[in-house]
Image (tube, rainbow, N blue to C red):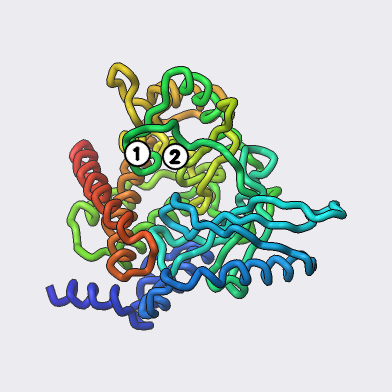
Amino acid sequence: MKHYTNTLAQRANPDEAWIQAIRKRFPVENAIDEVFTRKLHNRNKSAEHSMDFGKLPDSLSAFIKHETQQDDILVENVHRLSGGASKEQFTFDLTWRPEGEKTPQKQCVMLRMDPTESIVETHRVREWQTLRAMHGLVPVPKVLWLDAEGKHLGHPAMIAEFLEGTVRPESKEDKMSGIGMYFPPELRDVLKGQFVEILAKIHHLDWKKKDLSAFDVPESNSTQANQWALNLWQRAWEEDAIHAHPIMEQAAVWLRENMPVVDNPVIVHGDYRSGNFMYDDNSQINAIFDWELAYLGDYHDDLAWATLTLFGGVDEHGNGLASSMMPVDEFLDSYEQLSGFKVDRKRLFYFHLFSYYKISVIAAATSVRVAYGKKTHLDAMMNLASGLGYVGISELNRMLEQT
């Protein structure tokens, strides 16, 4: 009990020796280590999410002038977006001269900026590089500028084009995005093929020809990719959990002991599901969101995440749908046909269990920690999300009983 009490105290007020011990115990990619270590060093600082965003237009204007070397920049109508659980997000109207243009143009753009602590700690350079790598292959917004260290805007941030579209049909029910969404049959029929095809394209990207310098490359035909991935989430649990839980300990042991080899790593989106894509008036998917968890690993990770019961709705007859769009078997069969990659059901079980472990870390540990420390403007959402953590832990218990 004394040891656990000391651990709780260190999580709330980490000293340098404890931080270094955590880093040594859970080796991760260099960029991930950077953001996790920065989080711990900043944990004792005062909450900054209540900063005066009235100064943001001036900061944005100065930053964009610096990046473009244009003095006649105009920033107007800065508005915080209500969506997004992990980052501060704003839209604003920008008058500037895009490359190749001689006359100023007004464009709506979006700012994604780190809060003091996030429900998931991620690296803006990795997200920036992933979006640049994917642009032109799959529908993503064009990224414009990056403040990697927060030198200009106070927190690490990036600015990208803002795309218009719909995430989900209008509904009287107010649910968290991606949780039990409902698409009517005619919309499902149009979206589902696109959804699978885009995922296949993501996994087929020749990432070795792209600038992904913020990513560490795991060894092929080894477990290294999965070791780094598990270490990331286990480190997050060890740094953020308010309460111990034996199922989380058991799940981590099982995941480590049953870790599969990754033959040829692909870009894994990390959060591919309903709620993280947008479609236009012609029901064409025109944007895939939330690339911040992307890494080089096993494509089964994305397949498992997209087919979790938690993220799926049901059809008009009560049958479960992967990401609220199609039966799981149809999704997997379609993926095999479009990608040419074989789906290993045993490996899929591993990543389903890993998915619930991740959900449990995010919701039962990090979201509670962030809300408790008042390090985000979304305190109420973080507390609401904590309930999903115990759904995840319950699913872990159920799955572990099958092993």
Q: Looking at the image, which is closer to me, 27 or 198?
A: 198
Left or right of 284 in this view: 327: left
Q: Within 10 Å of the Cα at label 2, are there few (<14), some (14-19), or many (20+) other Cα atoms? A: many
User: Who's the residue at 32% across and 35% down the image?
Assistant: 173
> Where is mark 1, residue-wise?
179
Tags 2 and 1 in contact by the CB under 8 Å rule? yes
Is 337 positioned to the left or the right of 43 in the image? Answer: right
Mark 2 sits on what residue? 275
Tell me if residue 349 can be seen: no
Nearest the camera: 244 or 291?
291
Which quarter of the rendered picture does the C terminus lie within?
Answer: top left
Q: Quadrant of residue 202?
A: top right
3D distance between C-alphas at marks 2 and 1 = 8 Å
* Residue at the bottom extreme, as displayed: 16
In-front residue for pair 104/44:
104
Q: Earlier in the sequence, mark 2 or mark 1?
A: 1
**What x and y, as percent, mark residue 339?**
57, 29
Up-down: is 95 above or below 403? below
Quadrant in which the N terminus is drawn: bottom left
Query: Around disc 1, counting alpha carbons within 10 Å, would you say few (fewer than 14), some (14 to 19), or many (20 or more)?
Result: some
- The percent coordinates of residue 399 (x first, y second) are 23, 39
Residue 288: image quadrant is: top right
